[in-house]
Image (cartoon, coloured by chain):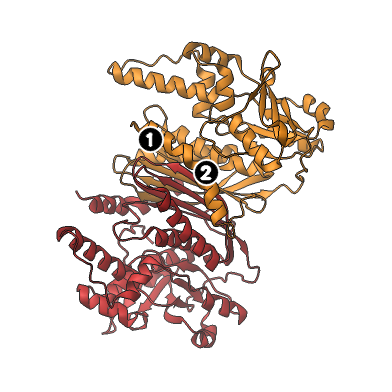
Chain colours: A orange, B red
Amino acid sequence: MSEKEQSREQGFGKHILMNDLRNKYKTVFDDSGSGSVVSSILYLEGIHFNLMYFPLQHLGYKSVINSIANLYCRSMVPVSIDVNLGVSARFKKADIENIIEGISLACQRYALKISSLDLSSSLTGLAINIASSGKGTGKVKQLKPEATDLICVTGDLGAAFLGLQLLERESKVFEDAGGAQPRLEGFEYVIGRQLKPELKTEPLDKLREAGVSTGIIRAVRDGIASELIHISNETGMGCRIYHDRLPIDHDTTAAGRELGFEPLIAALNGGDDFEFLFTVPVNEHKKIEKTKGLSIIGHLVSLEEGNSLVLPDGSLAEMKAPGFDTVP
Amino acid sequence: MSEKEQSREQGFGKHILMNDLRNKYKTVFDDSGSGSVVSSILYLEGIHFNLMYFPLQHLGYKSVINSIANLYCRSMVPVSIDVNLGVSARFKKADIENIIEGISLACQRYALKISSLDLSSSLTGLAINIASSGKGTGKVKQLKPEATDLICVTGDLGAAFLGLQLLERESKVFEDAGGAQPRLEGFEYVIGRQLKPELKTEPLDKLREAGVSTGIIRAVRDGIASELIHISNETGMGCRIYHDRLPIDHDTTAAGRELGFEPLIAALNGGDDFEFLFTVPVNEHKKIEKTKGLSIIGHLVSLEEGNSLVLPDGSLAEMKAPGFDTVP
């Protein structure tokens, strides 16, 4: 079994196991997210990133983005980060500097301070932990979900996943052909989305300023299908999404064509977009439409109606997320 | 070069590199610790723990202790933890349950909630990240250091290090002799200090209740010598410690004799004690002496006098910490 297959196999059982653990230790679990001001991520080499094509500076930057994204979802503004790096002997001083350079750039961009930095050895590869802490904006209350709530998303979807596929393909070509130059021209957008993601906080800020209260907010890490199932679990509602409302950039479509990969599937199940997916009451639709960088892609429905995607012919396809085996 | 030597070699340059990074990126560094409500730790298999003798349940427990210790040092009470585990294919469901069981026990003991849990794959071994967040007790202000301040420590020192040496020795015997039973009877105390450390928060609470304001508080991770150099750096003062005031349990002394290892060295440079080391104004010495579980081990001196240990003959030995190469 390849490393990838192994890790995928573990992935399939992950959500069942996590639910089991939550039930078994429910007296100490409180993961409603309401009280926590912390978001911590662990990036492991070979699992979460491949240094064949991922520059260390970008990796540092992206680790911060990934860590702070959850704080925005809880209507908090990130303030500071704790950084722990585990580095094996093959990394030099300059490599560590490059990672910190990327972390530092993200700190400047998102007005964060590094409140602690620790380096330790690692037997194999690189491990990055970024724990970010935030403070409440104090301006937002989370609404009770209603079956008519709109489901909205910032920016566009699927680009980061197709960027990753291109990088993986060219990295393989490079290995097989003994150092052939990668062909990545024309795909700067999707590759940039993979290597240097940004958080689209402006539309959320604009809505807040316009007095719009949102329901659940999720950062899109593993494709919107997986996030919609989370929203369904948290709200006790179903989700209906319209295939023609999913925002897909034309560069993403072009990358999909190059790779023979359906961009709609990338949008639904691809990872690392870091767009924000959220619900708002239906009577706010005019304010949503007026806000740049937002798309209304569907709405909540009753739990009985399940999670579904409306296809071109008007029929419904049940929404599934690979690796997500929780029964909603 | 063995793994240990490799990791030690990296350790030697670590503090210089960290200081370089702090200087280079000083616009984004704010590691005074004053503002942060987060403490995050990263434990990597083969570096921070050896599963030959470290039970997974204890490992989960100790990871929490290590993470929350810093919050007490900032006069905060820990409230919740974020947990990220990276597990390679050799770990089974029951192993993960054992880790979470240990984490859960620590949560019960220290009144914490698990605010998030995430599992991911790992190519090799186990990686544990615990990010804890706290809230201020609101009762303590940190004092300006004075050259007469007393240096105090909770509990006793060196036990966890000698416990580790015993476990390492027996693990080696087990490997060499093809499964010989380890001889650990009589050393329960030092082994317990290594495998299941607790935080001595009661003496600190008692002092607070008695109206005693403390200066810097540090959790003893790498021996008090290293922590005293930190205190020296942070206060701009020197530290003088008296060899006969260092609290060393008689079980620690017995373990040192068994291993042919000087307990004083274990107390100064051994890791994982998780005792609290702190300064208080000299006029509080009566309240300190009345508080159970505290020892006065020395006092601050002027920076020019440096960091030193007073030996039996009254002479001074410069205090050094292995792996700590920052010029004070």
Instruction: Determine the residue positioned at 25% across, 63% down.
Output: B168
Q: Secondary structure at mark 1?
A: helix
Viewer-nearest residue: B244 or A268:
A268
Question: Same subunit under labels 2 and 1?
Answer: yes
Image location of residue A207, percent across then percent down? 77, 34
Q: Quadrant of the C terminus of chain B?
A: bottom left
Q: Is residue B275 left or right of residue A115?
A: left
Image location of residue A289, percent across then percent down? 78, 24
Q: Secondary structure at mark 2?
A: helix
* Image height of A315 relative to B134, above or below: above
* Image height of B295 relative to A26, above or below: below
Residue furthest out toward the right: A283
Residue furthest out toward the front: A304
State the residue position of label 1: A6
Q: Quadrant of residue B238?
A: bottom left
Marks 2/1 in contact by CB < 8 Å: the verdict is no
Type of residue at label 1?
Answer: Gln
Type of residue at label 2?
Answer: Ile
